[in-house]
Amino acid sequence: MFTEMKLGAWSTDLRSKLSLPLRVELWNGERFDFSAEPPRVTIRVPGPASLRYLLAPSLYNLGRAYVEGALEIRGRAADMIRIGSELAANNGKPARRANPLWRLSPHTRQRDAEAIRYHYDVSNDFYAAWLDPNMVYSCAYFETGEEDLATAQVRKIDHILRKIDLRPGQTLLDIGCGWGALAIRAAQAFGARCVGITLSENQAQLARERVARAGLEGRVEIRLQDYRDIDGQFDRITSVGMFEHVGVQHLGAYFGKVCALLAPNGVAMNHGITSTDVVCRASPYGGGDFIGQYVFPHGELAHLSTVVEAMQQGGLEVRDVENLRRHYARTCAAWTENFESHADEIARLTDAKRFRIWHVYLAGCAHAFSHDWISLYQIVCGKAGQEPGLMPWSRRYMYP
């Protein structure tokens, strides 16, 4: 009775402040609507014990309750995230808080490999169901905003390869190569000799198959390898969507390794997600905590200023920086639409809990990029101390 009284007070307070296309259904059949328009999201509370998630609505609490089955939430993922964010904001808790201490835990080879396998080794079919045909799992590049996802992903790869001024015969190292799309494109369209590395066995297997089908086995090598174990030097280095797994405290050493692997006149580019909080606090309303627990274990986001400082500490000079936040919001929205369009197929490819994790994760990322909670930067760099004559006068070479 006490919890139901609290729910009544909560619903009255909420109606006085917000109009949300939300319906709450209780286990006893009672319903609460929070707008005159038809509900876009319905939250069903299966029993009194589940009310605590609703009465303290952070993105972490609501996301956890949905994933674990403590609340049944129906609706489009984008609507679920938007309404969940408004409920969290109305709850009045601080938007951001300090990262928990476990985010500063050591990033060993074993821990990093386990984290990568957890996220990427769901199954190749799972990812193929909602990614583009090339299975590019990183921010696309929309030159006009009218491109479809597949076109925008090819343009992203070409944009990167033009930024590093990749030329025929040069060697390219792709750290975190995914399913091989960038390495294959670099060899096919730019004439490079490529090495791609990943810690995901599923990715490595399919990437090798794709290299073989493209007839590029003599030009592209895919390795199951940790970046700390690479030797040699490369004319060009790319790292796309990988450094988020390195750990903020290890970024200086990471970029030091990139610098050591880079040829004297070489060019490298880091493409990665950053925090928009200068002290790298967690994303608002518990969204970062949800991702850390359910999506990217041991993942850490640094602010752009921290990344630039770490590059300098590692012996690299920043030459060009581009913000692609708008592009990643669009990319994640497209992934969410694909996921929901193929929901029946995806549900057969994984278990119900993982399905729910990804359902809200993709839409949550689109929301986070749209609201400047997180961002995405491409940073082109070279070895520090090089003669300035080695640098181009302008960005014109990037835009043919």
Image (spheres, rainbow, N blue to C red):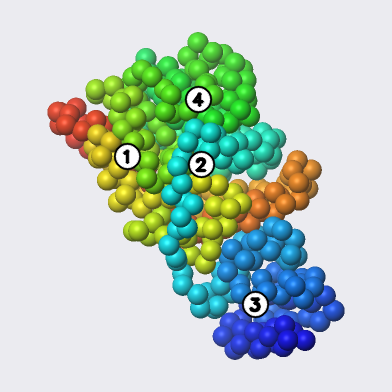
> Which is more N-terminal, label 2 or label 3?
3
Q: In the shown orientation, is residue 7 left or right of residue 119?
A: right
Q: Which residue is mark 1?
A: 252
Q: Which mark is residue 138?
A: 2
| Mark 2–mark 1 distance (CA, rounded to whole Å) | 23 Å
Q: Which residue is mark 3?
A: 55
Q: Residues within 10 Å of mark 3 (few under 14, many from 20)?
A: some
Closer mark to the observer between disc 3 and disc 2? 3
Q: Which residue is mark 4?
A: 225
Q: Position of residue 69 (x, y in %)?
A: 75, 61
| Mark 4–mark 3 distance (CA, rounded to whole Å) | 46 Å
Do residues under tags 2 and 1 come within 8 Å of each other at their CB atoms? no
Closer mark to the observer between disc 4 and disc 2? 4
> Which is more N-terminal, label 1 or label 2?
2
- Where is 115 relative to 268, above or below? below
| Mark 3–mark 2 distance (CA, rounded to whole Å) | 35 Å
> Which is more N-terminal, label 1 or label 3?
3
Do residues under tags 3 and 1 come within 8 Å of each other at their CB atoms? no
> Which is more N-terminal, label 2 or label 4?
2
Q: What residue sits 47% from the left and 51% below the top?
A: 103
Quadrant assignment for the C terminus: top left
- Where is 337 relative to 69, above or below? above
Residue with the most extreme right position: 28
The three-letter code of the residue at mark 2 reads: Ser
| Mark 4–mark 2 distance (CA, rounded to whole Å) | 20 Å
| Mark 4–mark 1 distance (CA, rounded to whole Å) | 20 Å
Asked if residue 309 can be seen in this view, the reply is yes
| Mark 3–mark 1 distance (CA, rounded to whole Å) | 43 Å
Do residues under tags 4 and 2 come within 8 Å of each other at their CB atoms? no
Q: In the shown orientation, is residue 201 left or right of residue 45?
A: left
Residue with the most extreme top position: 218
